[in-house]
Image (spheres, rainbow, N blue to C red):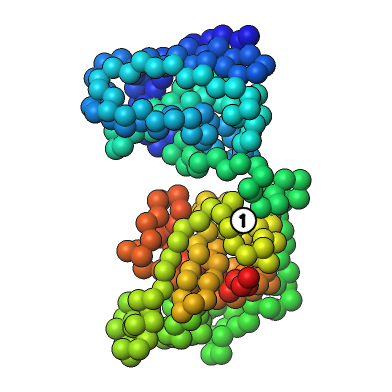
Amino acid sequence: MESFIRYLYEYKDEQRVRNVGFVKVDQGEEGGTLQIHGRGTFLNNADIRVYLVYMEGKRCRGILMGQLEHVQSILSCRLVYDREEIEPYADLEELRGIMLETNGQGTYAAVWDEGVLPLDQMEPAVPREERPSMGKDMASEESVEAEVSEILEACAEEGVIEKEPGTDAGEEEKEEPGTGAEEEGKEEPGTGAEEEGKEEPEAVAEEQSEESNENRQEQRYCKIMREDMKKLPQKNWYLANNSFLLHGYYNYRHLLLITDEGKRYLGVPGIYHRREEAAARSFGFSEFCRISEDSIILSPQECDRENDFGYWCRELEGE
């Protein structure tokens, strides 16, 4: 049996803000017990979700162990867990700490090795058996980036990235993403709305016919995680290991499911650039779709508002 005490801290942007208590940990080969003690008046009628956290590659995962309701001022509780509860998600030895997530009153955690965890990017754990085939066949983040970089270099060397008529090579390199003739033909799936010149998507939408506007209203966007691809028709599961999809997922930590006129599309987050377009097309994501900010809520880590951010899309197969 291993026993130790760790301080409980409030966290903001992955940084410790203040100490609010401590956690006493007793863990053996078959499970463990946590005694959680919060002090002071840092909570006010709070509902708290209690997670045991671990790292899956570079991602922080949380196993939901239960919820405390209407916690007032002082927190004092005991959590008992065993190997059978944990191992559907991770090995018992992989646990790195405990995280308390409140309803708008902050995030609190105690980390066993007192290291730094990306707690603000914590994602709920998914049972191993429900994940798409990732395991041993899943490429590492480094190998994915290397493969995509090789594709980009090969496209540049072989002239796959074509020069626009009326421009020379110097002008092409200086051209800002999202301007000029390069925007023509990049449509949102199923809309048929072309972007011309420097017009913003909103301006183009205003010029569409009433019928096109009605179609646009039928579009639905749903942010998903890579594990959620298991819920798609099985014909699409192989995309979970698509190198370009992994490239975008590692960078922005989500994917986008788009439903439009009865069809569904999978969107990989990224920025529009001609070199990026060549890589996207080589992996089957041929359309670039820009989504208005009010259509989907994204954290700063999930987007890039400084550049021409959107989604590289491909249509999904049906049942």
- The percent coordinates of residue 101 (x first, y second) are 38, 33
**Does the image show residue 176?**
no
* Quadrant in the picture for the N terminus: top right
- The percent coordinates of residue 120 (x first, y second) are 43, 39
At label 1, the amino acid type is Lys
Query: Relative to residue 313, is residue 148 drawn left or right?
Result: right
Picture residue at 76% right of the left edge, 50% below the top: 137
How many marks the image carries: the answer is 1
Residue 304, placed above or below residue 112: below
Of 187 and 64, nearer the camera is 64
Picture residue at 48% right of the left edge, 34% below the top: 64
Residue position marked by numbered label 1 in the rendering: 230
Picture residue at 47% right of the left edge, 19% below the top: 79
* Quadrant in the picture for the C terminus: bottom right
Residue 135, placed above or below residue 283: above
- The percent coordinates of residue 183 (x first, y second) are 48, 81
- The percent coordinates of residue 191 (x first, y second) are 44, 82
Q: Residues within 10 Å of mark 1 (few under 14, many from 20)?
A: some
Picture residue at 56% right of the left edge, 85% below the top: 164
Of 174 and 259, nearer the camera is 259
Query: Relative to residue 2, is residue 304 drawn left or right?
Result: left
Of 176 and 79, nearer the camera is 79
